[in-house]
Amino acid sequence: MRTIKKPFFLKPLCYHLKGLSMLVGIVIFSMLFNCTNEGVEDLVVVESSSSKVMQMKSTTPGAPQHLTSLPGMAMGSAIGLDGDLFVAQSGASGSILRIDKKNGEVSTFVSGLPGSVVPIGGVIDVAFLDDKAYALVTLVGSFFGDDYINGIYRIDGPDSYTVIADIGQFALDNPPTGFDYFLPTGLQYAIQAYRGGFLVTDGHHNRVYHVTLDGEVTEFKVFDNIVPTGLEVSGNTVFVTQAGTAEQFHQNSKIVSIDSKSMAVSNLATGAPLIVDIEFNRGRSLFAISQGEWAGEAEGDAALPNTGTLVKVNDDGTLTVVADGLDRPTSLEFINNTAYIISLTGEIWTVANVAGPPYGM
């Protein structure tokens, strides 16, 4: 793709920019009575016509179950209105889909957002703040032959929006230094609500931005050539996944934490290739997704199909595999104790009972 070393711009979700060829029955379960005690397994109440019987209930995560397949490619996601799952459709679609948490039905939440000639461009992620939805749009603009804005769009209706922040222009006015890059407006990847505004990662310019609702864009954290991707926030701590460059991600990518007061960065965990998203589940247990093993041919190549994993972040900095065999996952969410995993090809998979005792069901 290039002979100079550059950020592995965007997980291996795509092939070269020149020639971008591309790169559950839902598990909804009732929350039954759960009791734990020292030396006692989880128990659930099972009612029959004549009695209530206490039975042992497994705390082992279930196997991945296919929920539904979306049309086209999918990237970021969020839990939004009424606790449903919302998924950004990348490429030319310009839409965000809503998946009903009760029955798995898919509907179009908004359409008419900017699409991109790049399969992983256009609407790449979605976030909610004060019951309003916001779309992150990237890989558009003059470099790609259109006049769209790379930035954050507030969703005003099913086919209307307002641009609230032009991140691409900020990138043009404040170019990165210390490494080679070729996309002048960057490649914004993930958006996360943060203190009345948003944090946004740029996997090509290796930065995390802070963006206000008034459109002010500032650098929250600047990295070396490590390709920041997924985001999560807890109190004063910001968690960032670092996919790494082509020379790095096929080995071990990283999860780091940023203290928003001191801005100190700490290595939190490593041990999986191309970690691209991170989310808290119940009990403040932290999970991440690895997109999979590198095909090993050229920078920008996709991960090998069906090599992705869902992993749990351990206190000692290691990762435990919860589910494997996933096909290039791009985003992770939790509803109750079930993981919802979105894949590059638009499939949604669930893994039930992810968190163990005392938080598992």
Image: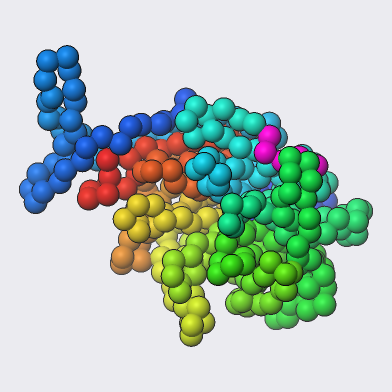
Does residue 254 appear to the left or right of 305 in the view shown?
left
User: Looking at the image, is 271 positioned above or below residue 292?
Assistant: below
Residue positioned 33% across, 40% down in the render: 353
Q: Is residue 83 visible?
A: yes
Residue positioned 67% across, 38% down in the render: 109
* Quarter occupied by the N terminus: bottom right
**How far across and down, in percent of the image, does residue 18 sit?**
83, 51
Does residue 143 appear to the left or right of 13 in the view shown?
right
Residue positioned 73% across, 40% down in the render: 158
Does residue 334 appear to the left or right of 136 in the view shown?
left
**How far across and down, in percent of the image, does residue 6 sit?**
71, 68
* Main secondary structure along the magenta-highlighted residues: strand
User: Looking at the image, is 1 positioned above or below residue 57?
Assistant: below
What segment is highlighted magenta in the picture? 108-112
| Rendering quarter of residue 300 | bottom right
* Pick the front one: 292 or 354: 354
Q: Is residue 96 magenta?
A: no
User: Looking at the image, is 60 positioned above or below residue 195?
Assistant: above
Q: How is the image coloured?
A: rainbow
Residue positioned 38% across, 34% down in the render: 63
* Tally of numbered tags: 0
**How far across and down, in percent of the image, does residue 348 sit?**
54, 35
User: Looking at the image, is 209 positioned above or below residue 301?
Assistant: below
**How far across and down, in percent of the image, does residue 221 sit?**
60, 77
